[in-house]
């Protein structure tokens, strides 16, 4: 069966796009790798948007990975999906920077630990350090505390002035920021600092934290460490969409450089929930040929794109973080390649060919962004399939 | 519901991901990082099917999970 509109990703952007296109009478199918809709921010959550999505008539196909294209058919792990219009809402993933001990069990991302807890991981009474950078640290710190974790410390790499300025400069977000901060009373929050190593025999036992010239040890059961978000542009790339400065280029209608393929949310710029929702709505309306209604949302979108730029500025990675990874620390976890093994490599391509860095199962999704920061490499090459696929998926 | 991880039977609540089931059995070296299907560190065999990202799958009663081999 061919759907008028196929949406890849059932996070906020995909939900908004699918809902609006379906409400305009189009047949809509939404594919997502997860067992349920919601993406990351709405994982295990129902709200007005998810209710509206269910009522809209859009069909959700969970547990499906899209990995390429053959003409007007999307290649997926559930077979070929013919599409009229395609909306990519593939979201973002965490950006990880390697440091000694980052491969120990119980060292996870910030969103990573939250996702595990939402997936049933018990954290009541467990000691947690939350580290890295970006507003996610506060949101997840508060969430973990609410779930009974003993949050020992939240440590943000940005300068205090950047973090405070950001909070004050976003009046629409100030109530939320204050609420989160109140939930975290009693939890030390440090800026200008970072975890310099994680130690333990079979799993994490301690981390060392540096702030200025101070270095101290925290005993903990979990370390949630991540440095902001990086866009999931791989599917867009393999479909031929133009990428600029690491993000999917779109015009005012959220259309990519490939006619009939749209993109909404984090892959066009890391701007958070509201940007994803407005871009998703615009894409859904345009796919349903309702451009006048879409145009009415352009002002709202511009507001959240300004927020995106402020976010990037406030939480930009500091150059001191390049020193976090010594030569003998593994950068590519899939293929076990240390930073030292990459010394002679001058590019991502030569690193892949000579050391197999980036050639493992994750296809460079973890080490690529890390090396883009550590070595300044352009790490965006993709080949189909952009997710491991079986022979069965490729037949027919 | 019950699932088996490397031959060991454990009880899990509904809506528990397979990655969490593996994590609570303390399988040595199991180090999921992103828990959202992008890092591939949580790979395991589920009911005989290899190379599954366990963070993207929910436990089912009687599920067999093995972390050796992939």
Image (cartoon, grey):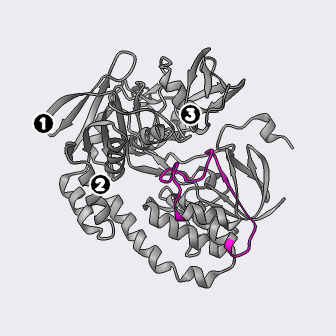
The crowd level at tag 2 (other Cα within 10 Å; few <14, some 14-19, many 20+) is some
Majority SS type along the magenta span: loop
Q: Which residue is mark 1?
A: A213
Name the element at disc 3.
Answer: loop
**Quadrant in which the N terminus of chain A appears:** bottom right
Name the element at disc 1.
Answer: loop
Chain letter for the residue marked with disc 2 in the picture: A
Chain letter for the residue marked with disc 3 in the picture: B
Which one is nearer the viewer's eye here, A256 or A17?
A17
Q: Nearer the viewer, mark 1 or mark 3?
A: 3
Residue B5 drawn at (x, y percent): 59, 20
Q: Is residue B61 visible?
A: yes
Q: Is residue A40 magenta?
A: yes
Q: Nearer the viewer, mark 1 or mark 2?
A: 2
Q: How many marks?
A: 3
Chain letter for the residue marked with disc 1 in the picture: A
Residue A114 relative to residue A320: left or right: right
The crowd level at tag 1 (other Cα within 10 Å; few <14, some 14-19, many 20+) is few
Q: Which residue is mark 3?
A: B40
Which one is nearer the viewer's eye here, B61 or A269?
B61
In magenta, the rendered stretch is A23-48
* Mark 2 → mark 3, Cα distance in angstroms: 31 Å
Q: Is residue A257 visible?
A: no
Q: At x 51% / y 49%, what residue is drawn?
A: A43
Residue A203 relative to residue A171: left or right: right
Q: Is residue B6 magenta?
A: no
Label located before the other in sequence (1 or 2): 2
The crowd level at tag 3 (other Cα within 10 Å; few <14, some 14-19, many 20+) is many
Q: Are marks 1 and 3 on the same chain?
A: no
Residue A127 drawn at (x, y percent): 30, 31
């Amino acid at each position: 069966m061919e759907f008028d509109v196929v949406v890849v990703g059932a996070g906020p952007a995909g939900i908004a796009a699918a809902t609006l296109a379906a409400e305009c009478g189009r047949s809509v199918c939404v594919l997502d790798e997860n067992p349920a809709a919601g993406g990351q921010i709405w994982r295990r959550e129902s709200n007005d948007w998810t209710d509206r999505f269910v009522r809209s008539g859009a069909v959700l196909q969970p547990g499906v990975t899209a990995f390429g294209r053959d003409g007007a058919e999307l290649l997926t792990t559930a077979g070929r999906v013919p599409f009229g219009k395609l909306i990519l809402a593939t979201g973002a993933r965490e950006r990880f920077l390697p440091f000694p001990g980052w491969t120990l069990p119980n060292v996870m991302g910030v969103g990573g630990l939250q996702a595990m807890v939402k997936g049933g991981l018990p954290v009541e009474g467990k000691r947690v350090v939350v580290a890295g950078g970006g507003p996610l640290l506060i949101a997840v710190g508060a969430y973990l505390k609410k779930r009974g974790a003993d949050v020992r410390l939240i440590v943000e790499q940005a300068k205090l002035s950047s973090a405070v300025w950001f909070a004050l400069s976003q009046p629409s977000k100030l109530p939320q920021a204050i609420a989160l901060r109140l939930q975290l009373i009693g939890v030390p929050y440090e800026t200008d600092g970072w975890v310099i190593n994680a130690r333990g025999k079979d799993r994490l036992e301690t981390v060392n934290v540096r702030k200025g010239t101070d270095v101290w040890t925290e005993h903990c059961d979990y370390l949630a460490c991540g440095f902001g978000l990086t866009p999931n542009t791989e599917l867009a790339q393999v479909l031929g969409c133009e990428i600029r400065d690491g993000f999917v280029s779109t015009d005012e209608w959220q259309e990519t450089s490939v006619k009939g393929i749209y993109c909404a949310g984090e892959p066009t710029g890391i701007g958070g929930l509201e940007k994803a929702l407005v871009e998703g709505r615009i894409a859904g309306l345009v796919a349903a040929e309702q451009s006048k209604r879409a145009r009415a949302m352009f002002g709202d979108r511009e507001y959240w794109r300004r927020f995106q730029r402020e976010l990037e500025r406030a939480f930009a990675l500091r150059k001191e973080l390049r020193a976090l990874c010594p030569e003998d620390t593994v950068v590519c976890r899939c293929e076990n390649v240390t930073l030292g093994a990459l010394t002679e490599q001058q590019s991502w391509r030569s690193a892949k060919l000579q050391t197999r860095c980036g050639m493992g199962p994750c296809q460079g999704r973890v080490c690529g962004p890390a090396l883009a920061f550590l070595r300044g490499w352009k790490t965006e090459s993709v080949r189909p399939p952009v997710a491991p696929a079986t022979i069965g998926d490729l037949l027919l | 519901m019950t699932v088996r991880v490397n031959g060991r039977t454990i009880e899990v609540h509904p809506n528990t991901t397979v990655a969490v089931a593996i994590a609570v059995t303390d399988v040595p070296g199991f180090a999921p990082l992103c828990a959202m299907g992008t890092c591939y560190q949580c790979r395991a065999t589920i009911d005989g099917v290899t190379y599954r990202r366990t963070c993207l799958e929910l436990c089912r009663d009687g599920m067999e999970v093995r972390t050796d081999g992939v």
